[in-house]
Image: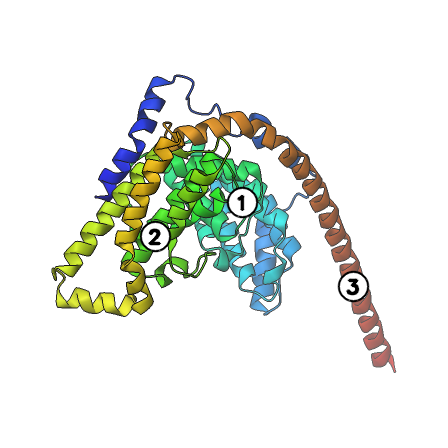
């Protein structure tokens, strides 16, 4: 059923893609200037022997002493092969589980992602990102953009959406470039007509909703509508706790109601804002699917085991929300007719709308990102130099104290 729903939603998108030759692979993605490594590679080099660094870290850990963040940074910066990426992953894990775990530097995380992309270990970067608590990988906006863009350019929209999910969990949709890339990845993935599990629907719904809230236009409102609808479906099937657990989402019931509120907002708006027609087609199919599910449940077709399992998940408040489904269906039909009569339904598909948004706005949105990135790299270099100087001073102090102890010991032996 889900597949057929998405098929209806994205038919227009597929047609647009086939008919428009300008919709070629990389035209509206991040520019060469954005992904260029010159600024990053221009940093002051600190060449290191990875074998020596690895031995030093192993001995330090064996003595139950903390390894410095500077040592880990040097290791990651000096990666020169795919095999060394695997070694770096091990030491990132070790560092995360050490007393110094809070001091993993932002530039180390950025360097880690860049090194993984450079040496064909993108799946390793995604693994550490998905398991961020175990590795301490919490990228900044610019790093997220590079990561998402690498998947989009290869047409791997599912993996791109996995990165977008992490952006959503960190609530890091602050940059317009991140918003555009994320919406493009989400729209392109949905256009592939994926078979979605409940957990995938929840992740996509939350990503669409939170990212869509940053765009006060047809794309943003359509994303909010899709996001609330997907979350509403999860709420109806699994209960509200299955929606917000581990997600930066509103804890209150009524996600389908919030989807309808988006439609009401557009209907009452005086500007040119519209909703994509295929989003309404999706909502219609989703409500039909939920209605048929509700009818089968009420007719007693569930087995005793399924009923018992459902009772364990859904509480009384969830059941009260499920009882509102006929009202939601009726209200949706009213609002759909109202929007159509007001000419507030955009015939373009959601994917086509996001593509247009990217083509029109992405280039301009890149400029402030690049300026901020250059300043950030300079700040990182300054902080790194301070750490190196501090390390040098501490080593000199330790050596001086060692010589003083040796001199004192020699004097005591003479006496």
Check disc 2 and report the residue beneath it.
232
Is residue 414 shown above or below 324? below
Q: Which of marks 2 and 3 is nearer the N terminus?
A: 2
Q: Mark 1 points at which residue?
A: 173
Secondary element at image label 3: helix
Residue 259 screen position, x and y as percent: 39, 47
Q: Where is residue 347 in the image (x, y as percent from the top left)?
A: 36, 27
Q: What's the residue at 18%, 50% (across, down)?
A: 292
Query: Secondary structure under badge 2?
Result: helix
Q: Residue at x 62, y 50 (%)?
A: 106
Residue wearing tag 3: 399
Dot 1 crowding, Cα within 10 Å, few <14, some 14–19, many 20+? many
- Residue 71 screen position, x and y as percent: 64, 54
Indicate which disc, 1 or 2, sits on the residue closer to the N terminus: 1
Q: Are marks 1 and 3 in contact (CB under 8 Å)?
A: no
Query: Foreground mark, 1 or 2?
Result: 2
């Amino acid at each position: 059923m889900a597949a057929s729903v998405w098929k209806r939603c994205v038919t227009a998108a597929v047609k647009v893609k086939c008919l428009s030759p300008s919709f070629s692979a990389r035209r509206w993605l991040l520019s060469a200037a954005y992904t260029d490594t010159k600024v990053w590679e221009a940093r002051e080099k600190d060449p290191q022997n990875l074998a020596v660094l690895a031995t030093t870290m192993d001995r330090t850990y064996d003595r139950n002493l903390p390894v410095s963040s500077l040592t880990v940074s040097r290791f990651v910066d000096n990666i020169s092969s795919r095999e060394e990426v695997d070694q770096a992953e091990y030491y990132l894990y070790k560092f995360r589980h050490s007393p110094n775990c809070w001091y993993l530097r932002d530039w180390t995380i950025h360097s880690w992602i860049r090194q993984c992309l450079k040496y064909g270990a993108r799946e390793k970067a995604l693994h550490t990102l998905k398991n961020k608590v175990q590795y301490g990988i919490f990228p900044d906006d610019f790093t997220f953009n590079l990561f998402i863009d690498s998947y989009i350019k290869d047409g791997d929209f599912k993996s791109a959406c996995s990165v977008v999910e992490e952006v959503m969990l960190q609530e890091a949709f602050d940059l317009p470039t991140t918003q555009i890339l994320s919406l493009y990845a989400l729209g392109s993935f949905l256009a592939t007509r994926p078979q979605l599990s409940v957990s995938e629907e929840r992740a996509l719904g939350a990503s669409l909703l939170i990212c869509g809230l940053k765009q006060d236009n047809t794309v943003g409102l359509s994303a909010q509508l899709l996001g609330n609808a997907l979350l509403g479906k999860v709420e109806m099937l699994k209960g509200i706790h299955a929606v917000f657990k581990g997600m930066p989402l509103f804890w209150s019931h009524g996600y389908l109601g919030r989807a309808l509120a988006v439609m009401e907002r557009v209907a009452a708006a005086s500007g040119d804002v519209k909703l994509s027609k295929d989003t309404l087609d999706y909502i219609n199919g989703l409500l039909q699917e939920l209605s048929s599910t509700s009818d089968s449940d009420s007719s007693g077709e569930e087995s005793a085991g399924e009923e018992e399992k459902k009772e364990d998940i859904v509480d009384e408040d969830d059941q009260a929300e499920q009882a509102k489904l006929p009202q939601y269906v009726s209200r949706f039909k009213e609002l759909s007719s109202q929007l159509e009569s007001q000419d507030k339904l955009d015939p373009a598909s959601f994917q086509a709308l996001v593509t247009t948004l990217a083509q029109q706005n992405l280039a301009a949105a890149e400029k402030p990102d690049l300026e901020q990135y250059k300043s950030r790299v300079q700040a990182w270099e300054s902080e790194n130099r301070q750490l190196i100087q501090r390390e040098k001073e501490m080593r000199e102090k330790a050596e001086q104290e060692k010589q003083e102890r040796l001199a004192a010991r020699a004097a005591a032996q003479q006496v």
